[in-house]
């Protein structure tokens, strides 16, 4: 512990004020948590109260611990204080932007931004003028004067840009909004937390609290990670936990949600299996049609099994999703494995073909789906056109009469899902090819040379060397492709009209989730569907991990 007598009076004063501030901050947060439940703050939603209470109580406890540690000149107190003040400063900054309606102003700026673009060219010209110092002789162009001209040109261009986009008027409007009580309170919070940050960040304060070099490195590391970490917590982890809470409510996005427990999950998983005396027996004779709807039936001889569910659309969507994954994954992985071996050869032009195969993976899903929608057209689409040409060729060559099927790709329930599978497999195959190609680059060439000496042929090399060495890559490709297939949405939504397809043949779990949450406004039920989908994907991924682990143990 640092001897407090060796600390200068200014630093000692700041440490004492920081200790007092930490206790005051703890009292304020406890008071805010109390006001949430006594009606002092205008928040009525239960989940919001619980969330804010947890945050405030945690902040109060952390602030109290920091106050004790600062009093002992412990560096951990400084770190906790910096974290609390940094988060509070960021929150006050966002509240200030919200109070000043800055986000609305940025949206409005899009309408006038085009008027100021030419003046941004003046700013660029000024910057380029400043770089001429490296190319012109210094004796003819003095450094200071050239940089001064460059700065004035850039400032002038920036002023003209702000004038053209009406930034001054917008700034006056923002200041007027911030001048209201809520805005002034958030600005005051920024000042207070900013001063506290400055007091703790000072080098004399760090020295007084025994801060070592590695402590500063850890703090700086967290500081650089903080934007990404805060974004993850706010925009991913936060909504994830919120959706888990909503899955136990009847939330409809308009009214305060009511807690209903496992009712949503019970409806999803409420199924009924019934024996049929004949394949054509009516469903109402064996189930209560007021509760259950028929999903499908399995016919065995003169008997059958009826499968019914309280929510038949969920089970139809699950069936379609699993069918999609079962077909799309092999169709995008096996051809990718073959193509990667071809592209790994040293034939001329292979680099060009590598780029060509990867292009579908980076193309926009909406544009690709619209192109395929045209290709699938039963009347003018090229797919049916080439099928017709092929059938005519074989009929004329062998004098047979094969009937042209005139496939209704997107309007027939037998082919609608297959049409979506073909698009997804075609678009994913290029990315998987690149992954396999990267894996092939790491296979030692000595193995193939040794196999050649032993008399192994190309087929033996592929099965005995290539596939085993590509096992980690194959596991990654299959796992990621399966997860992506289970979340299919864009291709179905764009290609099919309506997205559910004929007789619900293309409705998938994500599409059903979207329809429940954003069309029928059953967001509580949609959240439950999302978590069931997560469990299904997690289960499939876990099975693949277990198979990979057993395979690794066997190979070792």
Image (cartoon, helix red, strand yellow):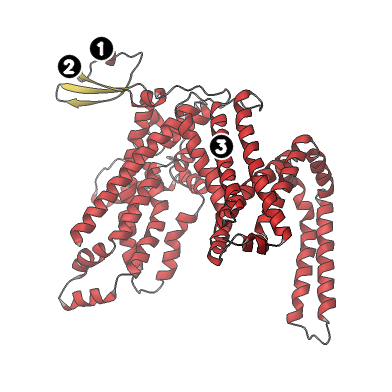
Q: Mark 1 or mark 2, which has the lower sequence index? A: 2
Q: Which residue is mark 1?
A: 285
Q: Secondary structure at mark 2?
A: loop
Could one spot residue 94 in this view of the protein? yes
How crowded pointer 2 is (Cα within 10 Å; few <14, some 14-19, many 20+) is rated as few
Secondary structure beneath dot 3 equals: helix
Earlier residue among tags 1 and 3 = 3
The answer for how far apart the CA atoms under marks 1 and 3 are is 58 Å
Which residue has dot 3 on it?
57
**Residue 431 horizontal/vertical position (percent):** 41, 57
Residues at marks 2 and 3, CA–CA distance in whole angstroms: 63 Å
Residue at (34, 50) in percent of width and height: 479
Mark 1 element type? helix
Residue 206: image x %, image y %? Answer: 63, 61
- What is the x, y in percent for residue 300? 16, 26
221 w.r.t. 84: above or below:
below
* Of the image marks 2 and 3, the number of the one nearer the N terminus: 3
Q: Quadrant of the N terminus?
A: bottom right
Of tags 1 and 3, the one toward the viewer is: 3
On screen, 133 above or below 542? below
x, y percent for residue 462: 23, 65
Disc 2 target residue: 277
Please name whichever residue, 345 or 373, is drawn nearer the observer in this view of the structure: 345
Q: Is residue 41 left or right of residue 449?
A: right
């Amino acid at each position: 512990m640092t001897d407090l007598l060796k600390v200068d009076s200014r630093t000692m004063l700041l440490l004492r004020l920081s200790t007092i501030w930490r206790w005051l901050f703890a009292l304020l947060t406890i008071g805010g948590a109390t006001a949430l439940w006594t009606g002092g703050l205008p928040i009525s939603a239960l989940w919001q109260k619980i969330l804010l209470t947890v945050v405030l109580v945690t902040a109060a406890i952390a602030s109290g611990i920091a106050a004790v540690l600062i009093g002992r000149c412990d560096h951990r107190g400084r770190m906790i204080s910096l974290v609390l003040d940094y988060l509070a400063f960021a929150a006050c900054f966002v509240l200030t932007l919200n109070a000043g309606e800055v986000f609305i102003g940025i949206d409005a700026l899009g309408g006038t931004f085009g008027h100021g673009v030419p003046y941004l060219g003046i700013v660029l010209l000024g910057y380029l003028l400043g770089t001429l110092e490296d190319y012109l002789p210094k004796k003819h162009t003095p450094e200071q004067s050239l940089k001064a001209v460059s700065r004035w040109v850039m400032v002038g261009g920036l002023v003209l840009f702000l004038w053209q986009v009406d930034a001054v008027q917008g700034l006056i409007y923002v200041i007027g909004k911030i001048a209201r009580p809520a805005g002034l309170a958030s600005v005051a919070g920024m000042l207070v937390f900013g001063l506290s940050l400055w007091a703790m960040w000072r080098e004399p304060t760090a020295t007084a609290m025994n801060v070592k070099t590695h402590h500063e490195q850890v703090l700086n590391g967290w500081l650089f990670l903080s934007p990404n970490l805060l974004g993850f917590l706010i925009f991913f982890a936060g909504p994830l936990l919120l959706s888990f809470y909503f899955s136990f409510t009847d939330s409809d996005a308009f009214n305060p949600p009511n807690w209903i427990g496992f009712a949503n999950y019970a409806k999803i998983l409420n199924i009924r299996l019934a024996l049929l005396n004949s394949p054509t027996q009516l469903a109402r004779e064996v189930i209560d049609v007021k509760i259950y709807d028929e999903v499908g039936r399995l016919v065995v001889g003169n008997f059958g099994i009826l499968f019914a569910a309280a929510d038949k659309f969920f089970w139809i969507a699950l069936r379609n999703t699993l069918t999609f994954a079962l077909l799309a994954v092999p169709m995008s992985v096996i051809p990718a494995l073959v193509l990667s071996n071809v592209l790994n050869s040293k034939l001329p032009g292979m680099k060009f073909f590598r780029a060509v195969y990867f292009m579908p993976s980076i193309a926009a899903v909406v544009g690709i789906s619209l192109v395929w929608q045209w290709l699938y057209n039963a009347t003018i689409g090229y797919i049916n056109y080439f099928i017709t040409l092929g059938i005519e060729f074989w009929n004329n060559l062998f004098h047979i009469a094969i009937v042209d099927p005139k496939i209704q790709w997107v309007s027939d329930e037998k082919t609608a899902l297959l049409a979506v599978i073909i698009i997804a497999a075609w678009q994913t195959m290029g990315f998987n090819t690149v992954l396999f190609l990267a894996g092939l680059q790491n296979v030692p060439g000595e193995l193939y040379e040794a196999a050649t000496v032993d008399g192994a042929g190309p087929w033996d090399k592929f099965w005995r060397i290539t596939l085993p060495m590509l096992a980690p890559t194959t596991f990654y490709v299959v796992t990621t492709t399966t997860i992506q297939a289970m979340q299919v949405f864009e291709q179905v939504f764009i290609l099919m009209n309506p997205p559910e397809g004929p007789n619900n043949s293309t409705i998938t779990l994500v599409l059903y989730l979207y329809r429940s949450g954003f069309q029928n406004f059953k967001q509580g039920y949609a959240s439950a569907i999302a978590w069931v989908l997560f469990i299904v994907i997690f289960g499939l991924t876990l099975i693949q991990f277990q198979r990979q682990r057993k395979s690794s143990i066997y190979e070792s």
